[in-house]
Amino acid sequence: MTMDRVLIGLDIGGTNVKIGLCAPDHTLLAYERIPTTAQDGPPAVVRRTVDAVRALLTSVGATMNDVTGCGVGAPGPIDHARGRIVEAPNLDGWVDVPLADLFADALSCRTILENDANVAAYGEFVAGAAARVRNMVMLTLGTGIGGGVIADGRLIRGAFGSGGEIGHLIVEPDGRPCPCGQRGCLERYASANAIAQIAAERLEAGRTSTLATTIATGKSVTSEDVARAAAADDPLALEVWQQAARYLALATVNLHRLLNPEQVVFAGGVIAAGPLLFDAIQSHFDALNWDLTPDKPVIAPAQLGEDAGLIGAAALAHDDSHC
Amino acid sequence: MTMDRVLIGLDIGGTNVKIGLCAPDHTLLAYERIPTTAQDGPPAVVRRTVDAVRALLTSVGATMNDVTGCGVGAPGPIDHARGRIVEAPNLDGWVDVPLADLFADALSCRTILENDANVAAYGEFVAGAAARVRNMVMLTLGTGIGGGVIADGRLIRGAFGSGGEIGHLIVEPDGRPCPCGQRGCLERYASANAIAQIAAERLEAGRTSTLATTIATGKSVTSEDVARAAAADDPLALEVWQQAARYLALATVNLHRLLNPEQVVFAGGVIAAGPLLFDAIQSHFDALNWDLTPDKPVIAPAQLGEDAGLIGAAALAHDDSHC
């Protein structure tokens, strides 16, 4: 088997490096993951990743000659234009790492570097939940809230490369303090961590809840615990859950006022709650949204799961004329 | 005098139609304004406008043969793709008016129709306050708050054509009700009307202020009155003014998180207050903005005044490949 064109998509996280080979139509041809072990330093991580890429190419009967580009997603902030990781706390403090050049040299192949939230959004845009639209926004509800914005088919990076930071939209003036230095950021109310933390705070403040049994066993409350208790109509859990959904809906209204996307896609661990999350966001959105025009975005779960980042990275390497 | 290429820019408002002839480098070659008299209906308004365009062309020694395009700004909502005014309460209830086609037929010239806030933003983008940047946002503080967003050199319209509605970003959950159906919209705190109205409400509630003398003479308080009293350290006026500036700053932080523009430009009557406005917005922005990255937008006044709309409309007719 020979192939004309293969794109490499890499998604570098704190725990694993995900490696994918994609066709230009975004089909995932082969996939592997290896441990990141970021503390070994960037050159070692790049070397092991490139070894795995070569083995993966061999496994599908391809060589580096078939490769037309490489896209790398990594935790930010990223300097996309210069292809550098500015600082990545998740990667054992990698600071000012020229990751695009390291991969380009090791692979002898054009390489672009992009923020991990942006590549995931781009993946869902080209091949997932939003594959037939031109305007979409993605929110990834995990430890924090990552964001990606596609307007008229193009990823919005902003002038300084830190656009799309939906998790740090201020949704409550003078609200909960955020380590970023702002107050009332969306991710202080609706990330997995925030949902768990707000529930724990209210338990500590003496509220009764079925969640108290989790605490009693010496474990921390998780957002999954809150979702489970909310599904069972626990009043405290419902209150925390509905608050999270309402702030997500408020952010969605604001995104719609500004960008008017056809789709707003939610990803990340919290979406495992399914209709408990999506029905709540939709009903708060309908209550908060204006009456002036009937248009509204489809609010939908992400479809590519863990693969979104590497598919998006490969697609950006294909589409991005700036690299 | 003959000219190779002339662009027509029209800015249709409730009171006047502004008519401009522009060179491709955005120089305004000739300008006129005529009363709109919208109640005569779209065909009559188009006929009078076209007569004025022809006279203006003659005055600069040009003819319709020199014209390469016509851009029209009008109050929204606008269906840009179909070139129609959906509904314009300012224009005596014009509903579903195919204004682009009416002008294209009367002028025998390619015509695009765009929302008035968008053409004004585009004018400042190509020839005014933001002429050397690629990413900018404009807020026009008038009766309401109009908005326009340029990302990576392109006007953001959104999938449904009602993007850029910055005046209806929700900045205060459960805040002041807005006729749009939402609560806590930016324009309920920081438009000229809102500034005047909030001051009047607090006077009625019994607050003392130098503004009471205005009321005593039987006049309504205006935003200019509030600015003047705030400049003279009237406590009530200062409180209302600072609240407006703080919500504008909060919206600016959110716009920066999402779009990362080099410039955020403020236009409209309220900017006549000068440093009283801009210093307040800047200091609230600095207090509200995150610490994670040092980038921030230049917060600047618009430079083109009344001409922004027609210069922007002409420029869009030149740049827009979709028309």
Image (cartoon, coloured by chain):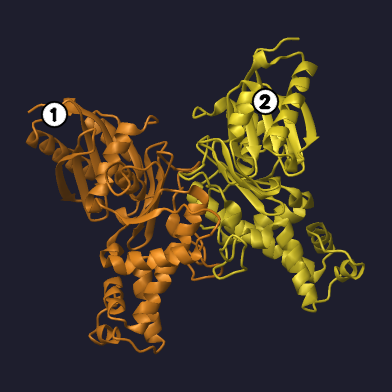
Chain colours: A yellow, B orange
Q: Is residue B42 left or right of residue A188?
A: left
Q: Nearer the viewer, residue B273 or A89?
A: A89
Judged from this view, the residue extending furthest toward the top is A1
Is A143 above or below relative to A14? below
Picture coordinates of residue B105, whole percent (x, y):
26, 31
Picture coordinates of residue A24, whole percent (x, y):
63, 22
Is B202 above or below relative to B54? below
Cα distance in 3D space between marks 1 and 2: 56 Å
Residue plotted at (58% across, 46% down)? A77
Picture coordinates of residue B239, whole percent (x, y):
40, 78
Element type at mark 1: loop
Labels 1 and 2 positioned on one and the same chain = no
The numbered disc on residue A95 is none
**Mark 1 Cα within 10 Å, few/some/many (few <14, many 20+)?**
some
The subunit carrying tag 1 is B
**Mark 2 Cα within 10 Å, few/some/many (few <14, many 20+)?**
many
Amino acid type for the residue under numbered disc 1: Thr
Say which quarter of the image contains residue A238. bottom right
Q: Is residue B37 left or right of residue A104?
A: left
Q: Which residue is mark 1?
A: B63
The numbered disc on residue A8 is 2
Residue plotted at (59% across, 27% down)? A111
Say which quarter of the image contains residue A280. bottom right
Evaluate whether residue B186 shows in this view: no
Evaluate whether residue A303 shows in this view: yes
Element type at mark 2: strand
The subunit carrying tag 2 is A
Residue plotted at (28% across, 76% down)? B231
Residue plotted at (24% across, 40% down)? B9
Callout in the foreground (1, 2)? 2
Amino acid type for the residue under numbered disc 2: Ile
